[in-house]
Image (cartoon, rainbow, N blue to C red):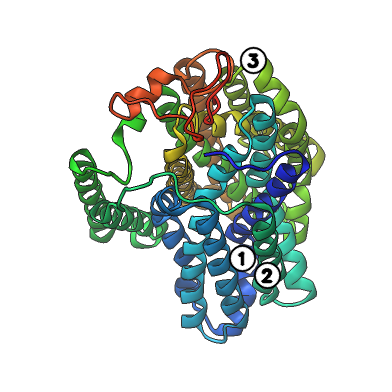
Amino acid sequence: MTHSIHGKQRWLALFVLCLGVLMIVLDTTIVNVALPSIAADLGFTETSLVWVVNAYMLTFGGCLLLGGRLGDLYGHRKLFLGGITLFTLASLACGMANSQVLLVCARAVQGLGGAVVSAVSLSLIMNLFTEPGERAKAMGVYGFVCAGGGSIGVLLGGLLTNLLSWHWIFLVNLPIGIAVYALCIALLPSARGHAHGERLDVAGAISVTASLMLAVYAVVNGNEAGWTSAQTLGLLFAALVLLAAFLVIEARVQHPLMPLGLFRLRNVATANVVGVLWAAAMFAWFFISALYLQRVLGYRPLQVGLAFLPANLIMGFFSLGLSARVVMRFGLRVPLAAGLLIAACGLALFARAPVGGSFLPDVMPGMILLGVGAGIAFNPMLLAAMSDVDPSDSGLASGIVNTSFMMGGALGLAVLASLAAARSDAMQASQGTTAALNSGYHLAFLFGAIFAAAAGILGGVLLRPGQPGGAGGAAQEHAHGGHTAPPADGHSPAPGKQTATGNY
């Protein structure tokens, strides 16, 4: 279903939607800088402090698929507004929190609201922009927000914590959330869900949400509990059992939460596999390089945020301008593969950064390559993940790709952090603390480069070739049991014109 707004109003709506998404993206990293202040103020121990982050990740990761499907069933605009409201109220509770329990519970509610906003925002943008050139530009804006928001969060978190207090990293969301809600009411017309007459697959929703939550819990606590501990292995096994149950349910239920035929669409399946590997590499770059800058080079939090600015500016330049032109000129496959391979080279440069390094020769080159690579690759990756998908499943496809990114990032970071820690512990006796830390970071960067290169090769080999354009009818038939979905307006498209899904 497309929205009946045109011209500048669509771009203003895109700006508002991306502002809401930026609020969610910022919140995944803005908290990290303030954790020491939060611990000192509320009396968190080192062990309990991790739940300020984990409570958010748990509900965020667990509810992405459910949020996307609810948007398809009951309306993307309605769910987006509900998610923004929930996230904003939870931000107020976080900012006013005077106890550990209140803060952790409010963070969990924040994660739920963030999952809904993230899952349906991409669908709203895809349905606002159906012409290939404009959609590529719009997705470039969205990609820039997603790719650069984390780094901006570190910088903003340092500023707010230093100048005011940790409470303001949450309270700053209030005026933004209120403005986004009001502008969305004014700009986006009310619309019913696409999936008329369908019921929510309750059994599927419960099983997949529980599976994702258990998997996230196991991953985020893996380093603390031990990766071979009974707790970690038991939780991962339970998550796999629930996932298997979910797949059985989806194969049999009349109105599945996730039509399994979606994964027979080559671009959708490939983009999600690539997304898992790329997210693991991106998390390695962002978090491990921040640790390198702080613990090895001695940077302060604000300096770390400033060190990421070159990459952010380059990503913005490519995402907001060149990436859309490259996609229209070369399609999805070539830019995706090239961008990921360039980013892999950037990670490889970080894998040789020395203990006594300085910014210009040892940090800047890797940042530049990662900014270029991410700026080129992010747009075609998102477009490929939403390609060939009927409008009635756009929220689901958005939820799936967000889940792939979140799970890939969380699992990849946990694995790479474990590798780095093991290498550092093994080298500490012979090299000293700082050199041992750097050696561990080198190993994490190397594996991150391998992940990015593997993602680039898979994307280059497996993505369907050709220019970007609308979902093919055969693909839609394949995904929906042999019945091609009609255009959203109920009329046949004119010869030579695209349906509402576009061709990404």
Extreme residue in the front direction: 491
| C-alpha separation, residue under disc 1 versus residue under disc 2 | 7 Å
On the image, numbered disc 3 is attached to which residue?
A: 330
For badge 2, the amino acid type reads Ile
- Are circles 2 and 3 on residues that touch, CB within 8 Å? no
How far across and how far down the image is residue 472, in percent?
Answer: 46, 19
**Disc 2 element:** helix
- Are circles 1 and 2 on residues that touch, CB within 8 Å? yes
Can residue 439 be seen here? The reply is no
On the image, numbered disc 2 is attached to which residue?
A: 169
For badge 3, the amino acid type reads Phe
For badge 1, the amino acid type reads Val
Say whether residue 44 is left or right of residue 14: left
On the image, numbered disc 1 is attached to which residue?
A: 31
Mark positioned earlier in the residue sequence (1 or 3): 1
Mark positioned earlier in the residue sequence (1 or 2): 1
Residue at the spot x=48%, y=45% of the render? 402
| C-alpha separation, residue under disc 2 versus residue under disc 3 | 41 Å
- The vertical placement of 123 against 455, above or below, is below
**Nearer the observer, 327 or 102:** 327
**Disc 1 element:** helix
Q: Quadrant of the C terminus?
A: top right
